[in-house]
Image: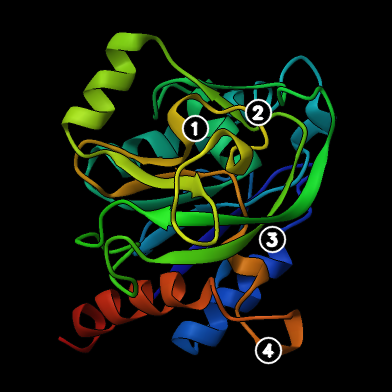
Amino acid sequence: MKAGIVVFPGINRERDMAIALELASGAKPRMVWHQETDLSGLDLVVLPGGFSHGDYLRCGAMAAQSPVMGAVRAFAAQGGYVLAVCNGFQILTEAGILPGALLRNASLRFLSMDCHLRVERADTVFASGYRRGDIFRALMAHGDGNYFADTHTLDRLEGEGLVAFRYAMPNGEITPEANRNGSQRNIAGIYSPNLRVLGLMPHPEDLVDPLMGGIDGKPLFDGLAAAFTPLRAA
């Protein structure tokens, strides 16, 4: 698997993401500076978490205007795979590549804690390492993770099966208590219509090794590696 990780000023999760990708695939990902526009030869483009441009204006608003985002938009439009986590998800919504917006957490506080996610569908490259209905632990670290969209958009996401993960209790129940940032319908991540772009707020890359405290996020990266390895072998 040939992956590229886009690095914006202020991003700070690119190394965590690189560790997760290399553990799964055995290949070092390429770091792509935000002023670059060449994404050729990549199977996967990743927008990691952090605080791009210091979160000035709105989270992800300035990064959405970076030169690389034109290339990311084209890559996605041509059917390329894009994984966007936390600030990366914010950037994709600001760029209009995914619908909706990430607003301030309902508590108006930065949240840094464990959460649990329920897998809403497993027939995608990103979730193939899980089963539908699986519950896994992930790490939440954001001040603006409150997913918002109008009712029509939410109904479309639901109707087209584009909700990837929901905040849940450890037993899988979808409750307000599990939804610490206040996201509408407990939505933690969504797909593009072709299921090749995934944006999610919690950090699966921070649980890929027992030394990190668990491996709940590892199946996501293992699934990605398995999906692309046959393509490269062929």
Disc 4 marks which amino acid? Pro
- Crowding around mark 2 (Cα neighbors within 10 Å: few <14, some 14 to 19, many 20+) is many
Q: State the residue in front, 213 or 95.
A: 213
176 sits left or right of 212 in the view? left
Residue 60 shows which numbered tag? 2
- Earlier in the chain: of badge 1 and badge 3, it is 3
Image quadrant in which you'd find residue 125: bottom left
**Number of dots carrying numbers:** 4
- Crowding around mark 1 (Cα neighbors within 10 Å: few <14, some 14 to 19, many 20+) is many
- Earlier in the chain: of badge 2 and badge 3, it is 3
Secondary structure found at label 2: loop
Image quadrant in which you'd find residue 221: bottom left
Which quadrant: the C terminus? bottom left
- Earlier in the chain: of badge 2 and badge 4, it is 2
At a point 71% along the width and 22% down the height, the residue shown is 106
Q: Are marks 1 and 2 in contact (CB under 8 Å)?
A: yes
Residue 161, given in percent of the width and then of the height, sits at: 21, 39
What residue did someone put label 3 on? 14
Residue 142, given in percent of the width and then of the height, sits at: 74, 40
What residue did someone put label 4 on? 210
Q: Nearer the viewer, mark 4 or mark 1?
A: 4
115 sits left or right of 23 in the view? right
At a point 24% along the width and 47% down the height, the residue shown is 195
Q: Nearer the viewer, mark 2 or mark 4?
A: 4
- Earlier in the chain: of badge 4 and badge 1, it is 1
- Crowding around mark 3 (Cα neighbors within 10 Å: few <14, some 14 to 19, many 20+) is many
Q: Using the numbered discs, state the Cα–Cα distance from disc 3 to disc 4 in whole angstroms.
A: 20 Å
Disc 2 marks which amino acid? Gly
